Amino acid sequence: MLRSSVIIALDWDAFYCSVEEHFNPELKKIAFAVKQKGIICTCNYVARALGVKKLQLHMEALKQFPDLVIVNGEDLSRYRDASKELWYFTRDMVWGGKVERLGFDELFLDVTEMIDFNIALLDNLHVPRASSQPVSSLFFRMSKDEPSVGFSCPVSSVAGNLATGSLPGDFRGDNLRLVLGSHLCHYIRSQILDLKGYTSSGGVSINKTLAKMAGASHKPNQQTVLFPEFAQDFLDTYDIGRIPWIGHKSKSIILDAIYKATDNVNHTVEGERDATVFNVRHMANKQLFINSLGQSSGDKLWDLLHGVDQTGVQPTPDMPTQISIEDTFKSLTSVIEVHNVLRRLSYSLLDRMYIDLKDSNGDWLGHPQTARLSTRPRSTGFYGSRISRSDSLPSIVFSSSHSRGSIVDYLVDRCWMPLFSKLIGDAKIFDIVLLNVAVVNIEKSPAKSSDITSFFGKKKHMDNSQLYDVHREGLPVTKRAKVVGDYADSEVAHFEFLEDDDEDVIFEEDSYNESCVVCGQRMMNFALEAHMRFHELGD
DNA sequence: CAGGGTTCAT
DNA sequence: ATGAACC
């Protein structure tokens, strides 16, 4: 017998604001907003009560609400850290760690196993006396091993809101499992609030999409359960654009397909197209979706309109699959400026790698294989499109014997600038509004082989090459740079490349190995920056 | 739209 | 490897 899943969706309320309040509790009492560049990306509920809107221009908001306090949220590190902490904390409560993270502020929990285990306990309670009153509560166990860990769980009432306001026909089978799910959701949210100090909104249903939508229907600091028998009614009143995974493009494609030949026929309002799930379901069919969106997307979105979401909870791995840092500008047109931005971004990128890819011992958990540089040209019609180029990531970034500064120098000159050169092509003239540096293809580091260095404790007096050799162990890369001397202290770096493990083809790199992306002239590494400044002034 | 992610298709 | 689309 196939039973449905029990999925909980959690969403931290006004997340960036909550983090700010966490560090500065004074903020709790006042209306404030977090801004990034010119835009308010979120505001607390005090501000929302006044009428401050998300995605409002921050100057506009200030004009309208002169007392609104603005907090700069362009540095995401604290949000990222808090997000990770809440994620781990929550995951520790879910058997099998079945928790998927979506962005910084949302989690999906697959609690099916926990529910079924406790349903079995409940069934056992009924066994001894066939004619007795049904039990009204059970002790919900949060641990398989430790019977005393858990909470008291009513079984004939629902915790929180009902998505359509009505109770299901019965409290048996899958419905009962969702009832338990609602109490589990409440318990988990309480733990998060009590121990971590963050409020959340929760949704409970049989799949991720329904759970997420249920949770979004009552905020903040509330939860909602959506029973499958009400799913269609619940969905039908929504605009399809408000269904998760259906964005502007998909919505537009779907409506275009529906209204393509019909002109203004069937428009509920003159000039407007009815985009409710109900209307779309009745105006379209699965084939229309597949024809316009393609087989796989068409199938998926059509299912969504009917409350069907096959995608299970994909536990988010501890290690990110990519790390990227970006910044945006009004306009960037000179190589020297690009160079400076890339330098700054590279520092942040290295920091992120140290935080997210190293364990508490300072050992690398994963090694990115690829470096990718992305940018967004200005003016070119379509707004969001990025272009990127990638290349293998120099392994000097994993070196512990080099200063951050020297690694950044190397990255910018040997990695990002050449990629940038590739990006802008022959024209050598550009106007960009975004730069993004990323490391991707992160390979899990091989399990640490018996580590000789650990026998010697702190390895203070090794020379650099020894240190680096030790560090190189187990690097899953084909091209390993071995660095001779201290790049940080010398004007000209000397790099030796080991082509492969067995082939020690060592060559000393030409000191005059840099070529200017503008004029192509070759010059010494350290001269490049000055040279580009020359171009800058010359123009 | 900001800044950072993921997943999917090609 | 790259880009579209989603959060």
Image: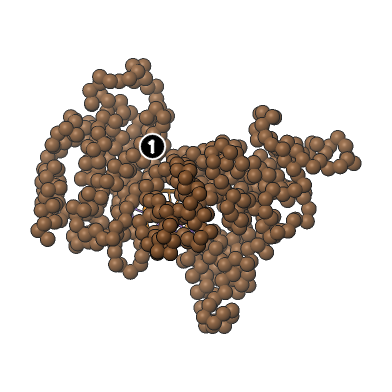
Chain colours: A brown, B orange, C purple
Q: On screen, A485 above or below A47?
A: above
Q: Residue beneath label 1, please?
A: A355
Q: Residue at horizontal 38%, vertical 37%?
A: A355
Q: Residues within 10 Å of mark 1 (few under 14, many from 20)?
A: few
Whether residue A315 is visible here, answered yes or no, is: no
| Left or right for A55, reference A112 | left
Image location of residue A85, percent across then percent down: 49, 39
In the orientation shown, which residue stands out farthest toward the front?
A67
Image location of residue A200, percent across then percent down: 57, 48
Image location of residue A191, percent across then percent down: 60, 39
Residue A274, image quadrant: bottom right
Mark 1 is on which residue type?
Answer: Ile
Q: Residue at horizontal 59%, vertical 69%?
A: A276
Q: Residue at horizontal 47%, vertical 61%?
A: A53
Q: Chain of mark 1?
A: A
Whether residue A153 is visible here, answered yes or no, is: yes
Q: In what quadrant of the picture does the C terminus of chain A appear?
A: bottom left
Q: On screen, A247 above or below A352?
A: below
Element under disc 1: helix
